Image (spheres, rainbow, N blue to C red):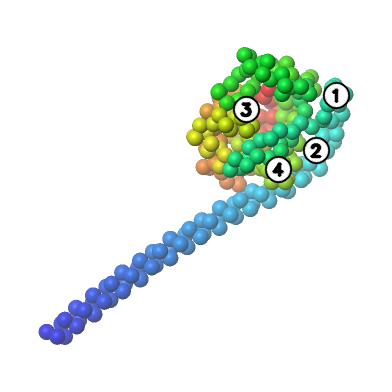
Amino acid sequence: MLIRQQVIELEAINYFKTEKQDGLLRLAGKAFRLTMWKCSVAGSKGIKRGMDILASLAMLMMLSPVFFTVAILIRIESKGPILFSQTRIGLGGKPFRFWKFRSMRTDAEQIQSQLSTKFMSDGVRFKLKKDPRITRVGGFIRKYSIDELPQLWNVLIGDMSLVGPRPALPQEVDAYTQADKRRLAVMPGITCIWQVSGRSEIPFKQQVKLDVQYRLSQSFAEDIKLLFLTVPAVLLGKGAY
């Protein structure tokens, strides 16, 4: 009887010891998988940032004749600065200085309130199909997104990425719903899904939906695909104004 009881106790001890070991193994497995996932995310961000630096630097050098030509045309047509800058909202709601070639009159922001009865808006954006503030040179460079080229500098210094949701103005972000703010969880970029799918013709809510879709599907291959799709979208000039 004593021997049988000792056997039962030994089996019980072994059972609980095995159960504890299994629990520790499961915890270790979860910790390992979490660590690998974090390394994968960090690696993906590192690859994306490396591509941004190399590509933006190469494009700034290769497109320098275009920069020079556009600068001369802007200066010939109207007095004022060649470049235009604004405060935009970036990753996590952080503001940064955003650069473009100037495509409007120098008093464009001052007379914006006078155009409020004609603007096309989704309750957030201010956008006019036939904006009287746009210069002749400005109309051309906006149609083919040449005015966006100075943002390669924003990409190089880390404010933006080549691919990501377009950065919004502070007053636009103030009008965001909680759902709209999801697009602030991604580094803003020069091009993204809705830039190759209709650009300004896409309603704001649909833009947010596509930006969130990008956030969930973002990968190196997806970024390369969107960059290639951007070329025909820019050359056709559809939806740009």
Q: Position of residue 170 (x, y in %)?
A: 62, 33
Between 113 and 188, the residue placed more toward the observer is 113
Which-is-in-front pick, marks 1 and 2? 1
Q: Is residue 66 above or below residue 108?
A: below
Q: Please rate how many residues cluster around mark 3, counting C-alpha atoms within 10 Å: few if below 14, some from 14 to 19, many from 20.
A: many
Q: CA distance from mark 1 to mark 2?
A: 24 Å
Nearest-to-viewer mark from 4 and 3? 4
* 10 Å crowding of disc 1: few (<14), some (14-19), many (20+): few
Q: Earlier in the sequence, mark 4 or mark 1?
A: 1
Q: CA distance from mark 4 to mark 3?
A: 20 Å
The disc placed on residue 186 is: none
Q: Quadrant of residue 104?
A: top right
Q: Quadrant of the C terminus?
A: top right
Mark 2 falls on what kind of element?
A: loop
What amino acid type should be assigned to the residue bearing mark 1? Lys
Residue occupied by mark 3 = 199
